[in-house]
Image (cartoon, grey):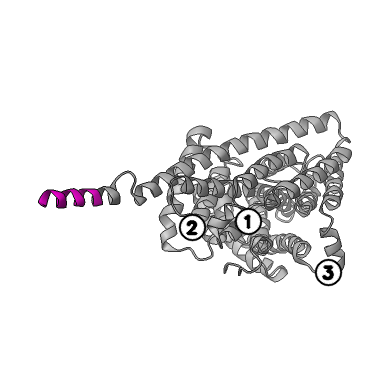
Amino acid sequence: MRRHGSLDRALILARRHGPTAPIWRKRAAILTGAVALGLAALLFARLADEANDLFMQFYHLAKWAPLILTPLAFAGLVWITRRIAPEARGSGIPQIMAARVDPEGSLRTLASAKTATVKFVVTLLALLAGASVGREGPTVQISATIMAYAHRLFRVPVRASVMVAGGAAGVAAAFNTPLAGVTFAIEELAAAYEQRMTLLVMTAVLISGMVSLGLAGDYVYFGAMTDTLAFGRALLVVPVAGIVGGITGGLFSRLMLDFNVSRRAPILWVRARPVRTAAVMGLIVAGIGCATGLTWGTSYEPARLIIIGADAPAWFGPAKFAATLATALSGLPGGIFAPSLAAGAGLGDLLRGLFPASAAGPVVLLGMIGYFTGVVRAPLTAVVIISEATASHGLLLPLLATALIADSVAGLVCRERLYHGLSQAFLPKDAEAPAH
């Protein structure tokens, strides 16, 4: 009897703590998912850059051809998306916010393999067509999907925390900004950042960040910014950047939400014809791009040059605003993070003329964070992304002050947070929106 008792205890211990135990399966799911999404994010980033470069080569060879090809591409890609995976349209962040309501069920829709594949491919094709889109929002949706499937592979329940961790790790890998992944999880993806999410989010961000660091190196997204602002100068620039950025960023969100949720008859008529709308928006994007030559794709390079002090045309910021808004309204898969940062850099460049005695780079960054915060309404995430993406740690306090002002001002222009408002369209009709 004693032998049987010892054997039973050994079997119980093996089930609880052996390689097939729930705790080990959960750890394997986190490790596998974080590594896989880190690799996917790096591949996506590389292909997105190549797609952007290929389009620019084509544009320089035939400068007016996009007036025909871009609208056709917009219409075709929106038709394909609506036909195959309508949940792949737009940014990707609202989808994962909505997926928290029913994580297991979302594997059939918002976070399905088909949706993630369409998101991946069509976003690249959109960049190849000159669309003003970023890859960061799509990376969030794709990464959350990969993390969810990793948990299903190891027979671990897919909970809301899994979606949050996958999306946060995607942000960390996309920008090479681990801290931004954590703050993004707190501010945007998690309705209430529960304690039990902490370890999962931190682990996923750490592993995906190590994958990105190991393969891509320790790069700074926009290049290192060493200039700072004296305290007296900062007191002058911060309020202006916060107010102007909050107004313009809030206006972008207001226009986006009005188009997507308005019940007014003209807008309902336009929304009921998504392919025609995409063609018209594609023509607008092509017209702006052909006229300026700077608003195609992410506009990463113009933004980087503005940050390091290069002169830019005064119309770059407004033109990028319009191209990004038209692309977003078209219904194409693609994010707004990188284009919004570029539009913010254009706004910051306009503010340089008001403060000629201040170093150009810090003024540009304050304008950038003011606008970006006004759009996404996540001040802590905006501060961490921009400080990590520019290594501008000496500007941390001015950046934070600007972001807080911009967030307050944007709330007066558009009461609803952009991603939270957009997520309503992806919720089940009988489900309540997560608190935010």
Q: Residue at x 80, y 44 (%)?
A: 74
In the image as oriented, which residue stretches furthest toward the top?
Answer: 61
| Three-letter amino acid code at the position of disc 2 | Arg
In this view of the protein, which residue sits in the foreground, 29 or 141? 29
* Mark 2 / mark 1, whichever is N-terminal: 1
Horizontal and vertical percent for residue 152? 48, 48
Q: Which mark is residue 264?
A: 3
In this view of the protein, which residue sits in the foreground, 62 or 238? 62
* Mark 3 / mark 1, whichever is N-terminal: 1
| Three-letter amino acid code at the position of disc 1 | Gln
Horizontal and vertical percent for residue 371? 68, 57
Main secondary structure type of the part rendered in magenta:
helix
> Which range of residues does the magenta coloring cover?
1-12
| Three-letter amino acid code at the position of disc 3 | Arg
Marks 3 and 1, how far apart in space? 24 Å
In the image as oriented, which residue stretches furthest toward the front?
Answer: 1
Write down the residue under mark 1: 95
Element type where label 2 sits in the image = loop
Horizontal and vertical percent for residue 405? 63, 65
Q: Confirm whether residue 238 shows in the render.
A: yes
Q: Residue at x 71, y 42 (%)?
A: 122
Q: Confirm whether residue 231 shows in the render.
A: no
Q: Which mark is residue 186?
A: none
Marks 2 and 3, how far apart in space? 37 Å
In this view of the protein, which residue sits in the foreground, 368 or 433? 433
Q: Are marks 2 and 3 in contact (CB under 8 Å)?
A: no
For the C terminus, the image quarter is bottom right
Q: Which mark is residue 159?
A: 2
Left or right, residue 150 beside residue 319 = left
In this view of the protein, which residue sits in the foreground, 225 or 134? 134
Element type where label 3 sits in the image = loop
The answer to if 154 sits in the magenta stretch is no
